[in-house]
Image (cartoon, rainbow, N blue to C red):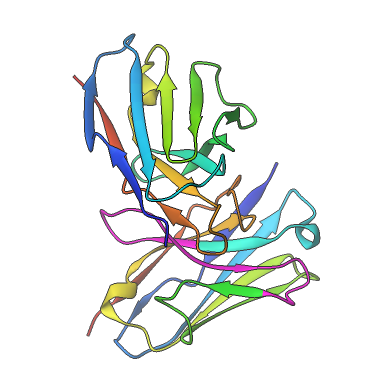
Amino acid sequence: EVVLTQSPATLSLSPGERATLSCRASQSVSSYLAWYQQKPGQAPRLLIYDASNRATGIPTRFSGSGSETDFTLTISSLEPEDFAVYYCQQRSDWPRITFGQGTRLEIK
Amino acid sequence: EVQLLESGGDLVQPGGSLRLSCAASGFSFSTYTMSWVRQPPGKGLEWVSGISISAASTYYADSVKGRFTISRDNSKNTLFLQMNSLRAEDAAVNYCARSITTFDYWGQGTLVTVSS
């Protein structure tokens, strides 16, 4: 099973700041990595697929990068609605799909 | 507009059974693979099961294999998850999601509670 480790567990920043979230895979997943955003009481929302492609309707302040085992989700300038939990997910080891444990982005 | 609406969640005793449903609309259901993903209260996401377009192929996480069965009715645009031999650790919000690889649309979830 591919284990995804996200860091940090919690990130405290202010609106307008840049956020950098990390996801590390226990083995190469090529570029088969996605990022999701989840707000309290809501379902996850797809942000990025295949490491760097924004999903439909996702603002350009969200960007993804990386390959093999190291991936980054960057939010260039935080808006109030961006404070949420973010998960990475791999499909390289399909059908054994796995998620990271999540990074909580909170307002400082 | 793509919509996925889950139902069927409930309080069930350990060892009991439950059948979840997911009604799909706003897209051509019969041309998409589908999945169930769950989230225990206060915890992270876990992929549970996936199904091919024709239902000829089904896939399960090791944690539910042999206990859960995924199915679909393309004539009714509905996805199902039959959950048997439920355990305390199966308690979770269960989401249906479009696709079996990258989940581009999710329902709002239905809560399964397992307790005596």
Looking at the rendering, which quadrant does residue B23 occupy? Answer: bottom right
In the picture, the quarter occupied by the N terminus of chain B is: top right
Write the start and end of the magenta stretch as one range.
Answer: B37-57
Rendered position, B98 above or below A23: below
Asked if residue A60 lies left or right of residue A17, the reply is right
Q: Nearer the viewer, residue A100 or B35?
A: A100
Residue A52 in percent (x, y) is at: 56, 29
Q: Is residue A63 left or right of residue A13?
A: right
Q: How many marks?
A: 0
Left or right: residue B97 versus residue B74 is left
**Screen quadrant of the C terminus of chain B:** bottom left
Is residue A24 positioned above or below B96 on the image?
Answer: above
Q: Position of residue B37 (x, y in %)?
A: 48, 60
> Is residue B94 something that shows in the picture?
yes
From this view, report whether residue A1 is shown above or below residue A74: below
The answer to whether one can see residue A43 in this image is no
Give x and y (percent) for residue A99.
41, 51
Residue A37, by quadrant, is top left
Comparing A58 with B115, the one in front is A58
Q: Residue B53: within the magenta?
A: yes
Relative height, residue B106 to residue B47 (above, below): above
Q: Residue at x 31, y 49 (%)?
A: A101
Q: Residue at x 78, y 71 (%)?
A: B54
Residue at 76% of width from left, 50% of height from top? B27
Position of residue A87 in the picture relative to residue B36 (left or right): left
Along the line of sight, which residue is nearer the eye, A91 or B18? A91
Can you name the residue that lies furthest to the top here? Answer: A16
Where is residue B104 drawn, in percent x and y?
61, 45
Q: Is residue B18 magenta?
A: no
